[in-house]
Image: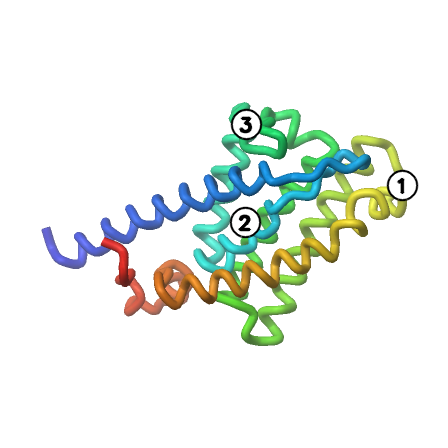
Amino acid sequence: MKRRDVRERSLKTKKLVYIALFAALTAVLSQISIPLPSGVPLTLQTFAVAFAGFFLGWKCSLASVAVYLALCACGAPVCAGFTGGFYKLIGVTGGFLWGFLPLAALCGVAGEGLKRPASVLLAAAGLALCHMAGVGQYALVTGSELGASALAVSVPYIAKDVLSVLLAALAARAVARRVRSPFARAEQGESSLIKIKHIS
């Protein structure tokens, strides 16, 4: 087998491992939650999803979120309060779960950390889309007006989510100094980052 084929197969294996790892991280951090009267708990899911985006790049972070959502839909207890089931995706909080997809993708496009104004805008757009999806589905399911829905399930969480994205960017930058992710830059054609240091 050619050396190039071996490296490509190794990269694919590492991608699968990272995708599974970040899906598991999202599930674990979902359990650190504070229930609120709106039915949307305070969790660390936003941090986990943004972290995946910044570190893995948009393709692998999307795959990680997709795995998490699939586990939820299958009934695995990966959501807040060790709950799961397809009803979670179509219920009052489901919009935020779907909103993790654009959040991960745009944080992935932004790259490791928020080093440029464009990166900040991309991450902010991802967070905004996540909240828009959450508010929209909450309004649809409960029959509430969009304004009232935003006040109930978006506004109280904005500061926490902005802080979560900022901390995720810092965490991704710090981790990347020791364990370089090959995914984000490999997607941009930089094959020199195929090797991952410190991982055997």
* Left or right placement of residue 151 versus residue 68 in this view: right
Q: Residues within 10 Å of mark 1 (few under 14, many from 20)?
A: few
Would you place residue 45 above or below residue 86 in this image? below
Residue at numbered disc 3: 77
* Left or right placement of residue 30 versus residue 93 in this view: left
Q: Are marks 1 and 3 in contact (CB under 8 Å)?
A: no
Disc on res. 60:
none
Would you place residue 27 above or below residue 171 in this image? above
Give the CA separation, mark 1 to mark 3. Answer: 31 Å
Residue at numbered disc 2: 48
**Quarter assignment of residue 88:** top right
* Left or right placement of residue 167 versus residue 190 in this view: right
Mark toward the viewer: 1 or 3 = 3
| Amino acid carrying mark 3 in the image | Pro
N-term mark: 2 or 1: 2
| Amino acid carrying mark 1 in the image | Glu
**Percent position of residue 97, x then y:** 63, 40
Give the CA separation, mark 2 to mark 1. Answer: 30 Å
